[in-house]
Image (spheres, rainbow, N blue to C red):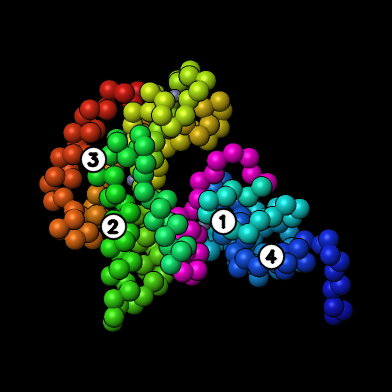
Amino acid sequence: MNEITTTATTPSTLIDLLAAPFIAGVARTGMHATPRDSAARAHAQGVEVSMALCGIRVTIPTVVFDAYDRNTPPRAWNGPMRVCPYCAWYVATDTGPDAIARELDALTPTGTLARLLPDPLIARRTCETIITAAQQPGAGGLDDGVVELLAHLSAHAPVLARPWECDDVQCDDSCECLHMAVCPACSLQYESGEQAGYYRPECTITAPCQVLAALAAHLSPPASNPPVDQIHDESQAERAATSGQVR
Ligand SMILES: [Zn+2]
Ligand SMILES: [Zn+2]
Ligand SMILES: [Zn+2]
């Protein structure tokens, strides 16, 4: 078979020019990462679909593609975007300490979200505990099993729920409408219509959810983590305090 000759404007050549080892891909579930080689192969074959590190099929726009950066949505995407926690942790553990620090920073709430949570650092601290344990002499290192644990935990990290009803044109992260921290993995968002992206009142689960509380109770050292009973009491108290505001 003849060697495929490419010009400087073909997508695969452009991908080859990117120094980054991972390329951003998008799917209904948000932004993912795909290895550069996989992306280059897809482009050489003229397809816009590649396999992400987490195992799902993602779209890589042929014209405008980007190196994977967990803090920057691909240019072909408009607006804020969910970052796939599996791809994020695969990239971070493959890349090194600075990338791991970026994932931990993403789990560090500030402002209104930090004030709403009884234990703002619960997700970050538990991930740090997992990483420290994996890096001990004799432990397995940051292998796939560790990544799965970090990703599952991060998926349940609390976020602010913005009510659709807010009519404040200045609505931002300090708006009075923000009074609830929810679990994005346990809760359900509208996928279409004018309320797309907002949490459905039928399934808005207060954070920290039971998944996060269970992981923290099991993994965090007792000295830095409240007892299990206290976690349950606090989350129940918070649920009771906010249950009237969900609907
Ligand atoms: Zn992914
Ligand atoms: Zn608002
Ligand atoms: Zn959850």
Which residue is pictured at 17% across the width and 43% down the height?
Answer: 232
Marks 1 and 4, how far apart at CA: 13 Å
Magenta stretch, residue numbers: 76-96
Q: Which mark is residue 118?
A: 3
Residue under pointer 2: 126
Residue 197 point in image, percent of width and height: 50, 34
Marks 4 and 3, how far apart at CA: 43 Å
Q: Secondary structure at mark 3?
A: loop
Marks 1 and 3, how far apart at CA: 31 Å
| Marks 1 and 3 in Cβ contact (< 8 Å) | no
Q: For the residue marked with disc 3, what is the amino acid?
A: Pro
* Quarter where residue 159 is shown: top left
Could you tell me if residue 151 is visible in this image? no
Q: Secondary structure at mark 4?
A: loop
Q: Secondary structure at mark 1?
A: loop
Residue under pointer 1: 69
Figure quadrant of the N terminus:
bottom right
| Marks 1 and 4 in Cβ contact (< 8 Å) | no
Which residue is pictured at 19% across the width and 61% down the height?
Answer: 221
